[in-house]
Amino acid sequence: MLWNDLVKSSTISIKRNKSRSALTILGIVIGIASVILMLSIGKSAEGLILSQVADLGSDLLFVEASAGDPTQGPPNPFIEQTITLDDAEAIEKTELFGAVSAILASTNTVSHEQESLFASINGIDEGYIDIFPADLLYGRFFTESDIESNARVAVLGKDLAEDLFGDQDPAGMKVKVGNVSFRVIGVFDEQGTRFFQDLDTQMSIPVTTMQKDLMGVDHVSYLVARTLPDIDLDYAKDEVRFVLRDEHNIDNPQRDLDLDDFYVSSQSDAEDIIGVVGSVLTLLLSSIAAISLLVGGIGIMNIMLVSVKERTREIGLRKAIGATRKEIMQQFLAEAVLLTLTGGIIGVLGGIMASTFIALVAKQFLSDWSLHIPINAIVLGVIVATVVGIAFGVYPAKQAANLDPIEALRYE
Amino acid sequence: MSQLLIQLDRISKEYVNDGIKTPVLFDVSFNINEGEFLAIMGPSGSGKSTLMHILGFLDTASSGKYLFKGQDVSSLDDNKLALMRRHEVGFVFQAFNLLPRTTVLDNVTLPMVYGKIPLSKRKEMALNALNVVGLEHRLDHLSNQLSGGERQRVAIARAVANHPSIIFADEPTGNLDTKTSIEVLEMFQRLNREGKTILMITHEQEAANYAKRIITIRDGKVVSDK
């Protein structure tokens, strides 16, 4: 059979049962569309997360309270708050870091006269701005003496300042957090998001004030340190662990991370974790897509078997006028592949449309979201559709090819 | 002097079903020359259809020798039988067996699909064949829009389109009324006058009378040949 005859006869028989063909390929369409969609979303989400992390810079170390190594197994829910300002000082003494900052974060009601809103409050110190550089719209940032004296001063995010004070100049004004009154000494310029938090709606106060006046605690949430230019990050990590074990009186000569009551991480660790999460997610979604393609394929096989039965006389006739087994086989295989390939192409287009739509919606909430259409996924989708057609078309095509022409011609 | 086309030498056929042998043909021997119009007659169950299937390469004999154009075709495999059907034979069936909801043109060109005739030649060949049966004006009609007589004429056009060596017609008038039956039989006569070799299976004496030679089969044996 010539190629164009093969294509023509397949097209004719698919068109002859339009709605049945359409329903049959639905499984393939959904399967392929979900492959495209999930790969697109996965790529976009990964890009978004990595862009958030990459903004931090690759020379930062984070120290959090932790029981054990969070990259090994699930996190331990019983975490004691073990990180203190003394730890920050001890780390600073290693002279490996250009800046060390302690951060204690919480949320509370922030009010000014009649305006009252719920906001994130960051207890930070004077080193913070060296690690996360930020411009001030006006006023000044905290000084060392603000921190040491538990000063009740605040630096506001730009949007928070606008919400509280409107057009007024907030410098020197009072804001209340709960019942504690703070004097505004500065307002940050626009900062955007970091770790998915909108920095412009946050309020910053000295970490010591946060500990004593607002929360009544001795610990901090985490420490951040920026290594000096020539310091190896892994070396710095080990040094920090060494210092903190000493500070916390942990006897751990084997350097077993599970024995520590803290965890030291860097941006590359975060990227590794995101990578692992990403591949688990991809695996999960791929198996859903695989199941949907399997079900779709069985649907194709089913309808091809029906088609072989219905067209028994036609097969008999084709054999009588000289079609070989191979040619009958080819014809039915071509039909199955044309069905799945059509489904695959519709699925690819549907997947692209759905990805675009989701990207448009996501952009409303996450301004850094960007649309990725993975070309390899499109190629993969089309190949997979063809393979499904061949795999599930072989059995019905064999049934057709093996029909006895005499019996097929008599079939009622 | 006409050429010898088919030689049958003691052809027998038996079917084996669940270990039980059912003989259908016994030692059938005759020759067919090119240009003949032969009718094989017999009641149902006489083995005439089985004989046609063997002659038409749809089935093989259990024993005996079948020479086609001098070549022994008694024990060809499936694939070679298909190629013989493709190149040497045209079939006309009682139930017409046209492709459903398909144009007359596509029906007539179907054998050319397997004959790998170039696309550019097909329409001309189909038109020639349809001209023979007087349906060239129906080219684009769908098979289900035609009357029974027209359908059988399309089937005849399909059978002659590839210029086969012989046309097998299996009860070609079985589904037609008397008037159209006569039309079809006269068409066979005309084709035969134009040089086509035709073998027709029938159980009706009136139809068989249109042939130049009648072989009668009863219980799997040739009982007369005249």
Image (cartoon, helix red, strand yellow):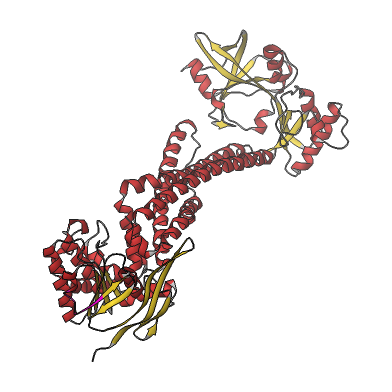
B213 magenta-colored: yes
Q: Taking the image as drawn, is residue A94 in sight? A: no
* Residue A114, above or below B169: above
Q: Locate the C terminus of chain A by quadrant.
A: bottom left
Is A281 included in the stretch rendered in magenta? no
Q: Is residue B82 left or right of residue B151?
A: right
Quadrant location of the N terminus of chain A in the rendered image: bottom left
Of A280 and A10, nearer the camera is A10
Q: Is residue B1 above or below residue A127?
A: below
Give the percent coordinates (x, y) of residue B89: 30, 75
x%, y% of residue A255? Answer: 84, 37
Query: Looking at the image, which residue is at 67% across and 28% down?
Result: A128
Q: Position of residue A374 (x, y in %)?
A: 49, 49
Location of residue B173 by image quarter: bottom left
**Front residue of B201 and A70:** B201
Q: Which residues are magenta?
A: B209-215
Residue A234 position by quadrant: top right
Judge by depth and name the residue closer to the eye, A161 or A244: A244
Q: Which x, y percent locates residue B71?
A: 38, 84
Q: Look at 55% across and 30% down and name the residue there.
A: A191
Q: Residue at x 63, y 42 (%)?
A: A275
Residue A178 horizontal side relative to residue A315, left or right: right
* Residue B91, visible in the rendered structure: yes
